[in-house]
Amino acid sequence: MRLWSLHPVHLDRAGLVAGWREALLAQAVLAGRTTGYRQHPQLIRFRNVAQPLDMIGAYLGGIHREATLRGYHFDQSKILAKGNPQARLFVTQGQLDYEWAHLGEKLARRSPDDADRWRISSPTPHPLFEITPGDLESWERR
């Protein structure tokens, strides 16, 4: 499971679709609707807030907005809690940099046109996240 801290605009088609699917799985875990992936480290940052379903809902909302801009039809009714659009989680600069490099490697393998676009752009966070100084997050697995 990869819940990107990067803005969905940076993802290629496969990454955007996978991001939606994996965030829906994360939502199911947080809602207690599945027994798998309960201990997945990517969920730590969502579990550590008062309203985890609201936060994952806000995260899904960001992916949904990008998908809609691209003309995709992701089913918004699958988002259990719409969340507060002003809500924020923090992500370290080191985490964002790590994910940026990781995404670049993925794009180079599967999506050359998107890899070209990646090379001339800079990382920005998903709308849910605010960047804070720091190294790689403690929950990240290399």
Image (tube, rainbow, N blue to C red):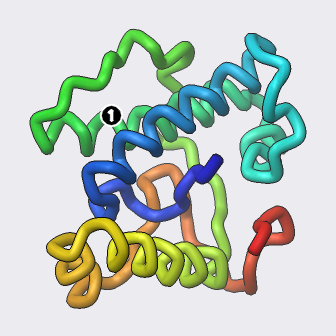
Residue at numbered disc 1: 64
Q: From what the image shows, is residue 68 above or below residue 96?
A: above
Disc 1 secondary structure class: helix
Q: From what the image shows, is residue 35 above or below residue 93?
A: above
Judge left or right: residue 62 versus residue 132: left
Of residues 125 and 11, the one nearer the viewer is: 11
Judge left or right: residue 30 versus residue 104: right
Q: How many marks?
A: 1
Q: Quadrant of residue 74?
A: top left
Label 1 neighbourhood size at 10 Å, few (<14), some (14-19), many (20+)? many
Residue, x 64% and y 47% (percent of image)?
Answer: 1
Judge left or right: residue 124 versus residue 113: right
Of residues 47 and 29, the one nearer the viewer is: 29
In the image, farthest residue toward the bottom: 120
Q: From what the image shows, is residue 11 above or below residue 102?
A: above
Of residues 24 and 133, the one nearer the viewer is: 24
Residue 106, percent from left and from top: 43, 71
In the image, farthest residue toward the right: 39
Give the residue type at disc 1.
His
Of residues 123 and 112, the one nearer the viewer is: 112
